[in-house]
Image: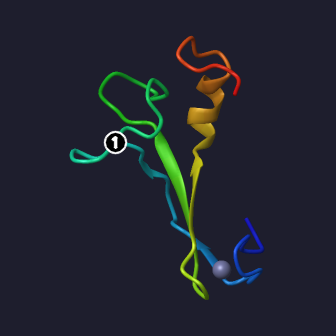
Amino acid sequence: MKPCPECKSNNVYRYKQPVDAAGPYGPDLLPKLAPGIFSQAKLVTVVCIDCGYIRLYASKDALKKLEKSEHWVPA
Ligand SMILES: [Zn+2]
């Protein structure tokens, strides 16, 4: 995750735990990759403290489901 792809800084921070990929008022960024019916797929959030660039990564659990999902196709 280092360096920042925008400004090349190594001062990047990752939120301690993955966050939900879908909020009540936002889009579902990782549809059909939730671990269960009553949960959401998770994102890992990384922010550069020098330029503010924000990156989102799919959590490891979401990535495990991705390749075998019938809803996702190779790009
Ligand atoms: Zn940066």
Spot occupied by residue 31 in the image (x, y as percentages of width and height) = 44, 29
Locate residue 16 relative to residue 5 in the image: left or right. left
Residue at 63% x, 34% y: name it.
Answer: 63
Any atom of ligand 1 within 8 Å of the CB at mark 1? no
Q: Is residue 24 above or below residue 31?
A: below
Q: In which quarter of the image is residue 48?
A: bottom right
Q: Residues within 10 Å of mark 1 (few under 14, many from 20)?
A: few
Residue at 29% x, 27% y: name it.
Answer: 38
Q: In this view, does 20 lie above or below 3?
A: above
Q: In this view, does 73 lie above or below 15?
A: above
Locate residue 23 relative to residue 18 in the image: left or right. left
Observer-nearest residue: 17 or 50? 50
Spot occupied by residue 4 in the image (x, y as percentages of width and height) = 71, 74
Q: In which quarter of the image is the N terminus?
A: bottom right
Q: Is mark 1 on a helix, strand or loop?
A: loop
Spot occupied by residue 70 in the image (x, y as percentages of width and height) = 57, 11
Residue that numbered label 1 is attached to: 27
Q: Quadrant of the C terminus?
A: top right
Residue at 22% x, 44% y: name it.
Answer: 24
Taking the image in four quarters, ligand 1 sits in the one at bottom right
Residue most extreme to the left: 24
